[in-house]
Amino acid sequence: MNSDAILIMGSNMAEAHPVAFANVVKAKEQGTKVMHVDPHYSRTSALANLYVPTRAGSDIVFLGAIIRHVLETNSYFHDYVVHYTNAATLVGEDFKDTEELDGLFSGYDPDSETYTDQNSWDYQRDKDGRPLSDPTLQHPRCVLQMMRRHFARYTPEMVENVCGVPRESWLQVAQTLVENAGRERTSAICYAVGWTQQSKGVQIIRAAAILQLLLGNIGRPGGGIMALRGHASIQGSTDVPTLYDLLAGYMPQPSALLTPVPAAEQSPGATTWGEQRDAPSNVLSQQTLQEYIDSSGQKLGWWSNTPAYMRSLLQAWYGDAANEEDGNCCYRWIPKIIGDHSHLTTSYAMLDGTVKGYLLFGQNPAAGSTHSTMQRKALEQLDWMVVRDLYEVESAAFWYRKPGFGPETEPVDSSKIKTEIFLLPAAASTEKEGSFTNTQRLLQWRDKAVDPPGDARSDLWFVYHLGKRLKELYAASKEGREQGLQALTWEYDMEKPEEGSRITDEPDALLILKEINGYYTRAPDQHGADGNQQQSYTLRNAPHVPSFTVLKGDGSTACGSWIYSGVYPEPGRNRAASRNPEGRLFLEWGFAWPANRRILYNRASADPQGRPWSERKKYIWWDEAEKKWTGYDIPDFPVSKSPDFRPEPGAVGMDAHSGTDPFIMKPDGKGWLFAPKGLKDGPLPTHYEAAESPMQNALYHQQSNPAAKYFRDRPDNRLSPVGDPNYPIVITTYRLTEHHVSGPMTRWMPWLNALQPSLFAEISPELAAERMIRHGDWVIISTPRGEIEARAMATRRMRPLYLGKRVVHQIGLPFHWGFQGKSTGSITNDLAHMVLEPNVSIEEAKAFTCNIRPGRMP
Amino acid sequence: MAVEPSRSTTNGQRASLGNVVSTLVGSKMFPLPQQPAMGFFTDTSLCIGCKACEVACKQWNQLPAEEPGWTGSSYDNTGQLSAITWRHVQFIEHIGRRDNGQNGQHGLRSDSQAHIDQAKGEGLIPLISPGTALPFFNTDRWLMQSDVCKHCANAPCQEACPTGAIIRTECDTVYVQQDICNGCGYCVVACPFGVIARDERGDHRAHKCTLCYDRLKDGMEPACAKACPTDSIRFGEVEQLKARARERLGMLHERGVHEARLYGVDDNILEGGLHAFFLLLDEPEVYNLPENPQRPSDTVVPASLWTVVAAMLLGLFGVLFFRE
């Protein structure tokens, strides 16, 4: 709403997020310029001021060319870039860019296909370990100059030849972003899985982040990058989280992969507690709590609080047991990861028979996950599987049905499938209490409207009672591995059952929220006094902590997820449930983590002296009279740290940052144009073609992401070679407003089925004419993994792209159908492959290749 | 007072409407309070085609789903308003042949154009774009419009209804009393917009949008307006909505959206205007709306007069003839 321009790219916002898009429509009515760059003209494009068709998988060229344009025309926001980003920081002499290595960065190990040695990506540092910089931005090794060289080949000609976007259209987008940046104006970028579901997805988002930093659009009203999440509370599931490689609040999951080294001597130059800058950052052990903190907590910046957050998390999970064990605080009970345990790699582990059981909570891999033919085969290898869903989804029915064509699905020989399947009815969102966390980190409490029908219960009920039964089962065990389960705090019964409900054993959601929020285990006022005299509390009677700033590393506080701390600061005050729609920022509507802050890094909304960049974009500023930061939002900065504060040499924690370092989560307090660590596929975004592409990479010899996981040894995961004439057409998948993901909730609903009753493929009239496909007829779409059928929709909304001298056709396909429900159809994900992005192990469902012909499946 | 369920309720007599209705339903009921006329302003320039209105309407009114069938007519698979579909979202594809930069010189475009022309000639792809009567390649727009009963100030359906089942409510909306309707279907042919329809699979009576009369009675807005995320559908007092519509049109014209126009706001459409009116981004015909909707009864007087004239002429002719 505060943006002067909005670029929507890699997202079909109007269709997949209509309610969020309503705000874009409102902004557009106020004069905001809305641009949509996408392979497929969707309902989002229809509402945009400018629609630019592009080739799926070429996003980094499009964005890289804008970055180059901004650098070449010197139209970056100079004061912001110099003071708030690492543009001036010098990169080590050992670092070699893709310019020098033809598409690779230094540190690449071709045998393991990973960047095993990322030390060359680090900054140049002085003898105290402080990064060197050149505020004039002239030094050839400074980040800005490195970027000039890195992006030099991302020219408008490349945009034409790689993206198929005419220079004029691209320039319109670039100029609109440049014109709507600086002191007076800001722009936002919105993306969704159109970016993430690519073998280089994280780097596309990095390119957007670089652009936003150069234009001064981070930490300011109307700026930012909005990650539109795919489902309700997916944001919440990464916060709390359900991801294998994270603990609550974005602390890494302990890993057994790190090999032990002698405890590194702590030095101020270290980017983490224990790491010396000359020690390889990935050669560390996480066997003890101290080792974990040494290797994952940063010594500089806000993450220096990791010991307190980790200790409070252990306290919340293991209660008094965490106190008894000196130093290690039950850390050893937390499972250590031993590899990539993401959803998709685990599917292969099932196929191989190493994973034998599967619990599915509202997940439908048999139709909704990539390469779903393989997913269904993997399910067949399981010993047991529990499916909790509203209906009998494809994943619960694969043992007697499979995708068929025509009205009836083919029967399956069930006697050959050994998987024992338990289908348990789940409560719908209106039938249970709890919180949703949406895209902008906003927690909103949902009340329960009615009891769920029959035996249906909430997921919370299921997990709670499963945990109780497991604890009971192992209560007498003397095995060391059971100790964690035995010590786990697991008492969330309601004090008295909900009035009017027939379900009497539903756990107390508010009590769990209290644990997530955090509480004092010892009386806070006596804190620090003689430990023996202190009163100790249990979860039920403990005082709530008001926010994560009071969390301690000594066991006096417990907190289930530090970033959510403050959501329930006192009894009777659940801020997620607060629904006051008033005020400039609606601060009393829900609770935005952290600390109800609506814009992160908002120190950047003021200039280095602490004054607003402009009256129009005023947000947070330094009040000289009061000697504190103030403004419309909660400042994301130490409140009394003056803009002219300069750190002492050797200072650690937040004291290591100056008064002009807004990016407090980073060790150097700067926004990272160049990422010296943290990414598995390079410090700067680089264009690689998709794993399946009709063309050679026009920029480098390196064809596709060198660090992606290709699973080349898997016979089921066949990829078509580059430029394969058998599969010349680019295919992208997407959602329609009328259905939700693979349809497990919507294809049982006759009203919605009438609105979109069939799978269809959107093709251009040119392609239809070329392939003799009649509008409305059936077509077969094929990839090396499989074939599916769909109705042909010949529409000008899909267009052939002119890349240099050749034409590339694209087709678009929704992925809502399966063989269960009241509306059935082919499973689009049967076409997709298993090539995973290196950082987050996500599939590449938004850009691969296929072929199309008229006809039906036999 | 004899009930005159139609033309008598013109604009000038709006004030007495409540009385008419209370008279209509007899003295058993207390007189309904006077209320301003309520209606919809559907602004298609804000519509994102999400069909939330269509589903909200079905849900609130517990209407069965249409028989699912993929039409290929853009994203519209329910086709039209019917006895069981009271809100319907139309999709009209106006996607032009964008001048793809310098690509004309590649000589590819004319090739593919030839392909297309050939394909059209062979009937492979439609000559006209799905959902509209306009040529396939035009300017670059995907028009979406949520259609609904227009709740005409002078409703032809009400005029045609022989049983008095169709009445005007205290909110001046057009309402079909299901217990009175005998399913004759006169209203169906009378409606110039094709809104009202008989439920041929169900009770064979006439059904259409009630403007959520039951919700209105409880002070709630109609379900479709409530569900619309972008406020493309606005509900309110007709006079206020009309003022808002004119304001909105002026704003769009100021911004250079010269193709924007209002439909049904002026009183001259069906002598009194519509209580559910639209802001359109093209000719009404593009949205399958008649430019100049006709009232069947308009032809009654001229036709009758001509009949009388013809009869008189015949009589005269007979008299003259037999005088001989």
Image: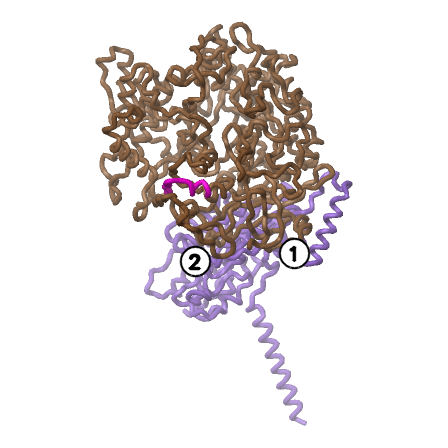
Please tell me whether mark 1 sits on a helix, a strand or a loop: loop
Q: Nearer the viewer, mark 2 or mark 1?
A: 1
Of residue A429 and residue A331, the one placed in the foreground of this image is A331
Magenta extent: A376-388
The structure residue drawn at horizontal position 29% and vertical position 12%, both measured from the top left corner, is A528
Q: Which chain carries label 2?
A: B
Label placed on residue B65 = none
Looking at the image, which is closer to me, A153 or B255?
A153
Q: In the rendered image of this protein, which colour is used for chain B?
A: purple
Percent across and percent down for residue A73 are 68, 23
Q: Residue furthest bottom?
A: B324
B131 to A221, vertically: above or below: below
Residue A378 on the magenta span: yes
Colour of chain A as rendered: brown
Q: Which residue lies furthest to the front in this view?
A: A416
Q: Which residue lies under the disc numbered 1?
A: B126
Q: Which of A795 and B165 is in front in this view?
A: A795
Q: Which amino acid type corresponds to the residue marked 2 in the rendered image?
A: Pro
The residue beneath circle 2 is: B64
Answer whether residue A544 is visible to the viewer in this image.
no
Residue A320 in the figure: left or right of residue A45: left
